[in-house]
């Protein structure tokens, strides 16, 4: 848990699959081991306009490499098993990784109905 009474918390954002999922995995573990308080696994998508140019390009590269939501969910689960203090996740993992401890719901768009409450 982040406690601001002594120091600010360090939040690390990674666009999964940029440059590869293996690299994302290694960097995520390194960030956690170096003291990251929160790790946000970014799911690449085709229209990340609100995220700014750096994340837009990272999403484009990840998608060009074939990164899928399923792969990101698998990566999140593996990180959770390896480092149980992982506390952040994107909305898409809610149904498949109920042991994670936090949830962030950005603007949600779906072509089909989604039950995110289980």
Image (tube, helix red, strand yellow):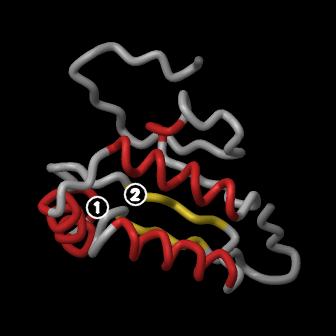
70 sits to left or right of 61: right
Q: Which residue is mark 2?
A: 42
Figure check: 84 above or below 2:
above
> How far across and down, in percent of the image, does residue 23 sit?
39, 76
x 40%, y 57%: residue: 42
Which disc, if any, is residue 4?
A: none
Figure check: 7 above or below 106:
below
> How far across and down, in percent of the image, does residue 52 sit?
24, 67
Figure check: 47 above or below 95:
below
x 44%, y 37%: residue: 92
Q: Quadrant of the C terminus?
A: top right
86 sits to left or right of 96: right
Total marks shown come to 2
Q: Quadrant of the N terminus?
A: bottom right
x 39%, y 18%: residue: 114
x 36%, y 38%: residue: 107
Question: What's the distance in space between the residues labelled 2 and 1, CA to CA?
Answer: 11 Å
> How far across and down, in percent of the image, does residue 67 sit?
26, 55
12 sits to left or right of 15: right
Depth check: 70 or 87 in front? Answer: 70
Which disc, if any, is residue 51?
A: 1
Displayed quadrant of residue 66:
bottom left
- Give the class, few, some or many, for how many residues have Cα within 10 Å of label 1's Cα (few <14, many ≥20): few
Figure check: 8 above or below 45:
below
Q: Secondary structure at mark 1?
A: helix
- Give the class, few, some or many, for how many residues have Cα within 10 Å of label 2's Cα (few <14, many ≥20): some
Depth check: 25 or 53 in front? Answer: 25
Q: Secondary structure at mark 2?
A: strand
């Amino acid at each position: 848990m982040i406690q601001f009474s002594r120091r600010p918390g360090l939040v690390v954002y990674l666009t999964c699959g940029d440059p590869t999922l293996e690299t994302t995995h290694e960097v995520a573990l390194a960030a956690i081991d170096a003291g990251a308080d929160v790790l946000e696994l970014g799911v690449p998508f085709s229209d990340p306009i609100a995220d700014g140019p750096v994340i837009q390009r990272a999403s484009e590269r990840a998608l060009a490499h074939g990164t899928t939501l399923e792969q990101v969910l698998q990566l999140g689960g593996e990180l959770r098993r390896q480092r149980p203090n992982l506390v952040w996740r994107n909305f898409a993992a809610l149904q498949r990784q109920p042991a994670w401890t936090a949830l962030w719901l950005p603007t949600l768009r779906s072509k089909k109905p989604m039950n995110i409450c289980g």
